[in-house]
Image (cartoon, rainbow, N blue to C red):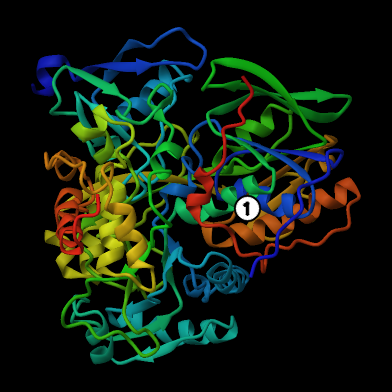
Amino acid sequence: MSAADTGGRRTYRVYRYKRGEPGWRFDMFDVPLTRTVLDGLRWIQLHLDRTLAIRHSCMHASCGTCGVQVNGREALACVTPADDLGATITVEPLANIPVLTDLVVDMREFVARFPDEIPSLRAAEQLPEATPLEGIDAYDRFEDCIECGLCLSACPVSATSDAYVGPAALAAAQRLLEEPRGADTDRVLEWADAPFAGWRCHAAFECTAACPSDVRPAERIMALRGRLGGRGATS
Amino acid sequence: MTPSAPRPARDAPHVLIIGGGGTGGALAHDLTLRGLLVTLVERGEFTSGTTGRHHGLLHSGARYAVGDHDSAVECIEENAILRRICPGSFEENDGLFVALTDEDMAYYDDFVRGCKECGIPIQELTTDEALRAEPRLNPATKGAVRVPDGTMDAMRMPLRFFATAKHHGAQLYNFMEVVGLLVHAGAVTGAAVRDHVTGTEGEISADVVVNATGPWSEKIARMAGVDVPIVPSPGVMLAVRGRLCNMVLNRMHGSGDGDIIVPQRALSVVGTSSWTVEDPDDLDVPEDHVRRMWEEGAKLIPAVSHAEFRAAWSAARPLIGSRAGDSGRELSRTFKTIDHADDGMEGFVTITGGKATTLRGMAELCGNVICAKLGIDRPSRTRTFVTLPHTAFYTDRDRRPA
């Protein structure tokens, strides 16, 4: 629907919950068309309801804090254009992670799923013709995973099983195996070779579809299984 | 190795920090290491104001080497300290200052001299050397100088200070908004807060209240009836997909729009512009500024012009203005610690200005002012204390009062 059809405004239908309240509800807000969904939510905070709690930080899909469900799909609100989502935009917190308040989920529950400390840096895929200057062995770059939780929210298996470690942690394990940098790969394989880890995924590939940062968790889980298969079934 | 820090004594002085950006986080870390009880409140998510939104440059100081030696020296010192105390939080790929025009080249000698005077290690490169290191750099490059710039994770690097403070007993509350300051007999004695997690209101009393709210610090100061000379000064940034360079690329001339490209994860971030606003909450992203980022970025790396758009956004810097009755106790001209006792208001300190690279140094000097007020003689320990990884931020229990 074009902006002209709605007078340039949007109705935001926003999930609300405060700790101690008996239940959650949707609140409706009339909001001018903004550049992104995050801008729309911040407009609500600034002009209509300062008690609305949302997470955000970098505004360019690098920090991973503003993950929500927009019209039922996982998205980083900061890079989700508001103009092609229809007249009513429904915003809900991520699924499969406990809600602290409003659109804020408890990321401790997400981080707790990771097997070990994930390396945050790796060697860059540098331009093939680039020669790093003296004193730099290889260019560094931050990992793609921004710990946003979108993959976990989108995962149909995680929706039915709290025990499943989920796609982000398995993808992180596979990243470790790809570039161990001194990590104990046997321990990682041991952790992954369990019914609620590497073998629980149903290969729906929803995680890869949801990932805003090209981590491709589903492909990594498949690669991880290849390694587990070579190890001999111990589960 | 980082030694362990004892938890503060129960009867230690209590400091309430308002503002959960890099400055507030680093101050919470500094003060807990000095044995103080610390509570920090932030109205939104931590690092959601200015801190998390910057382009992610770990400054070498070279940007300030011509004309602002204080800033340059401060940056190169803190650059080295941060690499030590936050290992793994930086892409340590260095940076280049690139001269593209005769005008840029006219700046070259001053730039090299300025860097040397400020203790910033440099390496002068030929055009060929620069292009071998960064093949997508504009081939019209006339000269380049290598400097120890780097890329930081603008959220996770500061989060390490929050994590470390938390593990040393600091109480850190996000989504807790200050709605008023408690003032009794010429002193700030605490703050009235609204908890957006529980929807409840309450009061937090403290021996000293610190206003660490960056471009919002004038708004908070006004709650105590005092003045802070801050002008919110937003800048626009543009992120495009693709890692078009591995080093930080800067234009070799005086600070200007679109004069830097910071590679970050699989993105390249072009920054920035500058204007001033009244209200740091109400920032737009002017289209003409975004267009200028595309144009100026493409001068450094022509491939920017056909890269895929990822995001454009604004962040408000806390620009320090002048203030009637400045007492001369301001500790640096790159940031300010204001003891509002000078305004007749006890128990209230504002720390503002500065930049992400200097967050630790700002916290150390502000910590000195707070300790002096409280009659405590303990030096800062943050210069050598290796901070916990950012993931440690998520490993505690939620101690929010019901």
Give the SS element for disc 1.
Answer: helix
Q: Position of residue B15 (x, y in %)?
A: 76, 40
Query: What residue sits 14% from the left and 42% below the top?
Result: A209
Query: What residue sits 38% from the left and 46% below the top?
Result: A58
Residue bearing mark 1:
B26
From the viewer's perspective, is residue A163 above or below residue A1? below
Give A187 or B140, whichever is nearer the viewer.
A187
Query: What residue sits 34% from the left and 26% below the top?
Result: A41
Relative placement, left or right, of A8 versus B40 is left
Question: Of all residues shown, which one is farthest toward the top?
Answer: A22
Graded by Cα atoms within 10 Å as few (under 14), some (14 to 19) or many (20 or more), the crowding at tag 1 reads: many
Query: What residue sits 56% from the left and 67% below the top?
Result: B82
Give B80 or B305, whichever is nearer the viewer.
B80
Quarter holding the C terminus of chain B is top right
Give B395 or B303, whichever is nearer the viewer.
B395
From the viewer's perspective, is residue B239 above or below residue A153? below
Q: Position of residue B204 (x, y in %)?
A: 73, 26
> Three-letter amino acid code at disc 1?
Ala
Q: Quadrant of residue B285?
A: top left
Relative placement, left or right, of B225 versus A30 is right
Residue B261 appears in view: no
Relative placement, left or right, of B43 versus B237 is right
Residue A114 appears in view: yes
Q: Quadrant of residue A81?
A: top left
From the viewer's perspective, is residue B154 above or below residue B174? below
